Image: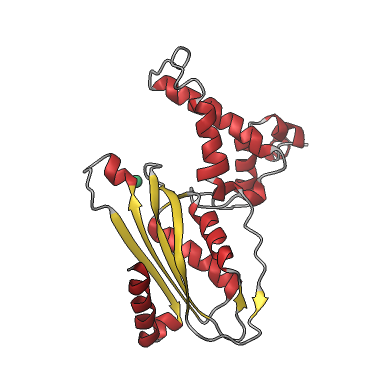
Amino acid sequence: MPDSTKKTLPSADDLARLPASERIRYRLVSAECRHHANDNIAAFIHDGELSELKAEVQTHMQALLRALVIDTDSDHNTADTAKRVARMYIDEVFRGRYAKPPVVTEFPNASHLNELMIVGPVRVRSACSHHLCPILGKIWIGVMPNEHSNLIGLSKYARICDWVMSRPQIQEEAVIMLADELQERVKPDGLAIVMEADHFCMHWRGVKDDETAMTNSVMRGAFLRDGNLRREFLTLLSRKKG
Ligand SMILES: [Zn+2]
């Protein structure tokens, strides 16, 4: 066999010897699958690899503290910081990258509801992709169902929202991702999302401005076509916001 063909594919043993992050990356690249900060990569992670990944992040986090010239050996405050941060990233604040999509039961719209429905405020906890600083805010969702739409429970909107937001995000992309997820499951006639959030990178660094709230919206289907529906949604929203 010529050398070039021998080299093309690593064997299962070769892969097993790699760090978990390299193994997962190999699968993603082979499948030509995008893996930006706000993409979910759960389908490429095998059983048990998440704890390997956590250990790897911990090692690198420890190296980061060392590069910051922090003496984690004698500083009891930072002794376990690398471990804490690795857990926080993988299990909590960036969980939406590694966890499978929430299981959501959809019900057919049996009573043919066709009235504007508003869900919210749904609490948003995210982080910005630029600085990995928190983004905290609220989301309101407007749904205009038709007879072919699926209905999902109110708490499910919050679970899908949390899954999309628990990633390093960019607010403009986050609302579009959430709209795509809801569109796919609910299949409404119209979908509207408004997100209002506070970006902590603006408080903590840079201009240290206190006016750091950002509002974004996505309007689809009936909300784009029908100005009256859009106005109804925005009016009800301002009343809900108080
Ligand atoms: Zn930022």
- Left or right: 139 in relation to 188: left
Residue 36 percent coordinates (x, y): 49, 49
Q: Is residue 104 above or below residue 1?
A: below
Give coordinates of residue 200: x percent, y percent. 33, 45
Q: How far across and down, in percent of the image, does residue 41 sit?
A: 60, 49
User: Image height check: is 118 above or below 73?
Assistant: below
Residue drawn at (54%, 79%), measured in percent from left and top? Answer: 188
Residue 51, by quadrant, is top right
Residue occupying the point 50% across, 50% down: 166
Image vertical order of residue 242 relative to residue 147, above or below: above
Which residue does the image show at 52% across and 31% down from the upper left?
A: 84
Query: Which residue lies most toward the front here?
Result: 242
Figure label count: 0
Q: 179 or 17, which is in the foreground?
A: 179
Q: Is residue 232 left or right of residue 57?
A: left
Name the residue: 48% across, 23% down.
63
Quadrant of the rendering where the N terminus is positioned? top right
Chosen colour scheme: secondary structure
Residue placed furthest toward the top: 74
Residue 148 picture quarter: bottom right
Quadrant where the C terminus sits is bottom left
